[in-house]
Image (cartoon, grey):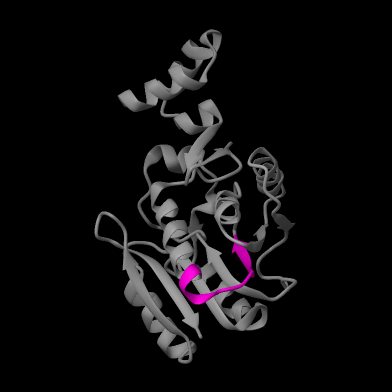
Amino acid sequence: MEDNEIELLKKYLPQEKYQEGLAKLKDGYPVQYIIGNVDFADTLIKVNENVLIPRFETEFLVAKTINYINKMFSSKIKIIDIGTGSGCIAIALKKVLDADVTGLDISKEAITLAQENATLNQVAVNFINQDMKKPIPGKYDCLISNPPYIPEDGFVEDRVKKYEPHLALFAADKGLEYYKIILKQSRKILKKKFLMAFEIGDNQKDLLATYLMENYPDYQFHFEKDLNGFDRYLFIYHE
């Protein structure tokens, strides 16, 4: 329990619920779930146990992706956010870009919350409730995703493992399962000129680079680091 978490309780919880919230916080329950929201990329996003809590690293993914889009495209584009969860990425992009934005997630509960967040932030985002393995409708200029990427035997903080949805955390095949699914889908849903943007695990750069070179030799790609110096972002593009 940290001082900034206590300050968040004081800021967002009514006085009559403060002691209850403090007790949950002492037990390791995430403060974001207690207060029900998180600030993400200058956007207020509602969260609950059905969705992953948005992280600062993902804010950086959004900022970097906006820069790429502004460099690559000069007219209105179509974006799809695969594994949208709370809708934080899709909504943050929609707020600043001239784009039609779609968010897709297998969880019905996540999609319901994402729709609430779009309404809260007064943006129009099209949300689709389906498995990413099934045919995805539409053609897109940009695909963005922060998919589950923690290996099934990978380290996770206890409170993350206990309270946040495992569906949004863990992936088979050394954490690469969903990247491979999305890359396979990309052949069908992306236009000739495209951008893909991914958040990745900090030890997955070499695995992903090898996979891309062996299976998608026509795709240009490179990795970028987060503020801690870890390889955290993968950008794939074709112009």
Q: Quadrant of the N terminus?
A: top left
Q: Which residues are magenta?
A: 70-82
Residue 103, compared with residue 16, is above or below; it is: below
21 part of magenta stretch: no
Quarter of image, res 129: bottom right
Q: Residue at x 54, y 13 (%)?
A: 14
Q: Residue at x 28, y 55 (%)?
A: 227
Residue 152 shows in the view: no
Residue 126 at x, y percent in the picture: 72, 57
125 lies left or right of 54: right
Out of 173 and 43, give the one closest to the viewer.
43
Residue 18, compared with residue 161, is above or below; it is: above
Q: Residue at x 45, y 43 (%)?
A: 161
Residue 236 shows in the view: yes
Residue 71 at x, y percent in the picture: 46, 73
Residue 95 at x, y percent in the picture: 58, 51
Out of 229 and 107, give the one closest to the viewer.
229
Quarter of image, res 130: bottom right
